C-alpha cells in the first residue's frame, strides 16, 4: 500500500498538493471503517499522506510497541534529539529500523523531527547532524523549529528565513549532509529535509505565520480546556484549500491537569471522556490533520485507533466537552452549570 508519494520531480517552489490521488487515499483508508474522520489524509499542502494519529516519545513507548503502532497503520512519527531526548530514546531503535538507510519501509513512514535550540540558521546543521546520527537516516520529512513563543520569535524569524536553503533537493543543507554522511539515492531525491514546520506555544504567532510560504506545517497545543486555537488558528483555515499548511495538534490530553480525570463539580453520572476521546476532539476541529499522542504501550495505540474510527463528535458532544474543559479551568462554577448541556455517561 502506497502511503506517501515520493515523486522527486516536483519543484520545491511549485506547491502542487494533489500528488496523492483520491484513489490512493481511498485505498489507504480501505483498511478502516468508512467515516467522516478518515484515518489517512493529506498533510495540508505537502505531498505527504499521514495517519490522523501521530506518535511521539513523551510516553516512553518501547520500540516493540512503536513497530506495533506502525503495523496498525500509524505512519506519522515525531522525534526530538534535544529537549526530553531521554523520553524519546526508547523508540529510537524502531525508528532506525523504519527510517534508516536501506530500510524497505522508509517510503511508508512520515518522519517528523524537532529542535528546540532556536538560534541562527547556521546551527541547523548541528541539530540535523545529531538526528542523522541518532536515527541513521537519509532524510527527514518534516523538520520542526520547536516551542516558538514571544521570547524566541526574533531568532525563529532568522531561522525560518533560511527555509529555501534547507528544504528539498539541491540545497546547501543537502550538500552539507552528503559531505558528512555520504551520497545516497534517497538523499539526492528528497534532500535532507523535505518540509519545514514550527511548533507554536503562542497562538497569535501561529496565526501570523499560517500563510507564509516559508512554513509548510504548523503545530499548536489544543485540548478541551485550552481552546485558543479554535479562535485564533483553525477558523482562519479552509479544510478544502489545497494551499493551506498542514496542522498538527499536541497536548490533547492535558497540560497541567489530566483531562481524563473528572473536574471538581462535575455532576455524578456525567460522561467522563477517555484519552482517546480527547484525541478525537482535536481531530473533530476544522483543518486538523494529525493529533500527536504520547502513548506508553500498544493497548493505548489500539484504544486511540478504535476511537478515531467512530468519526467526528456531534455538535452536542463538542459543546459538552467544551463545558467539561471549562470546569477543568475553573471558568464556570458547579452551581452555574446549564443542566441542558450535560451528557450522561456512555
Image (tube, rainbow, N blue to C red):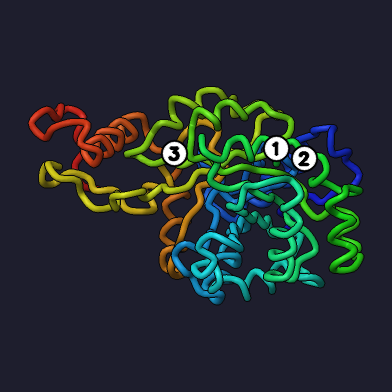
Q: Is residue 73 visible?
A: no
Secondary structure of residue under mark 1:
helix
Image x and y of residue 35, in percent: 51, 42
Q: Is residue 5 left or right of residue 9?
A: left
Return the disc, 3 or 2, that comes first in the chain's sequence: 2
Mark 1 Cα-neighbour bin, 10 Å: few <14, some 14–19, many ≥20? some
Secondary structure of residue under mark 2:
loop
Instruction: Measure how far apart labels 3 and 1 are at the Cα level.
Output: 39 Å
Instruction: Measure how far apart labels 3 and 2 are at the Cα level.
Output: 38 Å
Observer-side mark, 3 or 2, equals 2
Per the rendering, the mark at residue 312 is 3
Residue at the spot 51% in from the left edge and 74% down from the top edge = 62
Observer-side mark, 3 or 1, equals 1
Per the rendering, the mark at residue 158 is 1
Q: Is residue 134 visible?
A: yes
Image x and y of residue 208, in percent: 58, 26
What residue does disc 2 label? Answer: 162
Which part of the image, by quadrant, shows the N terminus?
A: bottom right
Mark 3 Cα-neighbour bin, 10 Å: few <14, some 14–19, many ≥20? many
**Residues at discs 1 and 2 in contact (Cβ within 8 Å):** yes
Identify the image quadrant of residue 186.
bottom right
Residue at the spot 73% in from the left edge and 34% down from the top edge = 214
Amino acid at each position: 500500500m502506497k502511503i506517501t508519494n515520493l515523486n522527486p520531480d516536483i519543484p520545491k517552489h511549485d506547491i502542487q498538493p494533489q500528488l496523492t490521488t483520491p484513489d490512493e487515499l481511498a485505498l489507504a483508508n480501505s483498511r478502516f471503517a468508512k467515516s467522516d474522520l478518515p484515518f489517512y489524509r493529506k498533510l495540508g499542502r505537502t505531498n505527504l499522506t499521514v495517519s490522523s494519529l501521530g506518535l511521539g516519545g513523551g510516553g516512553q513507548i518501547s520500540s516493540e510497541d512503536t513497530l506495533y503502532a506502525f503495523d496498525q497503520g500509524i505512519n506519522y512519527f515525531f522525534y526530538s534529539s534535544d529537549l526530553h531526548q531521554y523520553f524519546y530514546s526508547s523508540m529510537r531503535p524502531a525508528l532506525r529500523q523504519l527510517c534508516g538507510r536501506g530500510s524497505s519501509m522508509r517510503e511508508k513512514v512520515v518522519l517528523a523531527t524537532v529542535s528546540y535550540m532556536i538560534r541562527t540558521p547556521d546551527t541547523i546543521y548541528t541539530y540535523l547532524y545529531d538526528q542523522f546520527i541518532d536515527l541513521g537516516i537519509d532524510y527527514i520529512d518534516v523538520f520542526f523549529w520547536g516551542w516558538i513563543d514571544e521570547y524566541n520569535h526574533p531568532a525563529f524569524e532568522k531561522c525560518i528565513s533560511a527555509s529555501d536553503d534547507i528544504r528539498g533537493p539541491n540545497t546547501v543543507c543537502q550538500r552539507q549532509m552528503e559531505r558528512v554522511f555520504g551520497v545516497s539515492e534517497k538523499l539526492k531525491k528528497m534532500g535532507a529535509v523535505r518540509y519545514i514546520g514550527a511548533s507554536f506555544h503562542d497562538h497569535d504567532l501561529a496565526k501570523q505565520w499560517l500563510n507564509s510560504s516559508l512554513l509548510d506545517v504548523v503545530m499548536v497545543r489544543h485540548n478541551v480546556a485550552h481552546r485558543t486555537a479554535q479562535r485564533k488558528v483553525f477558523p482562519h483555515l479552509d479544510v478544502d484549500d489545497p494551499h493551506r499548511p498542514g496542522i498538527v495538534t499536541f497536548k490533547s490530553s492535558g497540560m497541567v491537569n489530566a483531562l481524563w480525570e473528572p473536574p471538581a463539580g462535575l455532576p455524578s453520572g456525567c460522561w467522563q471522556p477517555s484519552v482517546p476521546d480527547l484525541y478525537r476532539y482535536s481531530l473533530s476541529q476544522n483543518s486538523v490533520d494529525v493529533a500527536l499522542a504520547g502513548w506508553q504501550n500498544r493497548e493505548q495505540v489500539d484504544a486511540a485507533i478504535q476511537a478515531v474510527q467512530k468519526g467526528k463528535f456531534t455538535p452536542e458532544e463538542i459543546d459538552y466537552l467544551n463545558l467539561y474543559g471549562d470546569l477543568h479551568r475553573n471558568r464556570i462554577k458547579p452551581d452555574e452549570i446549564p443542566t441542558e448541556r450535560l451528557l450522561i455517561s456512555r
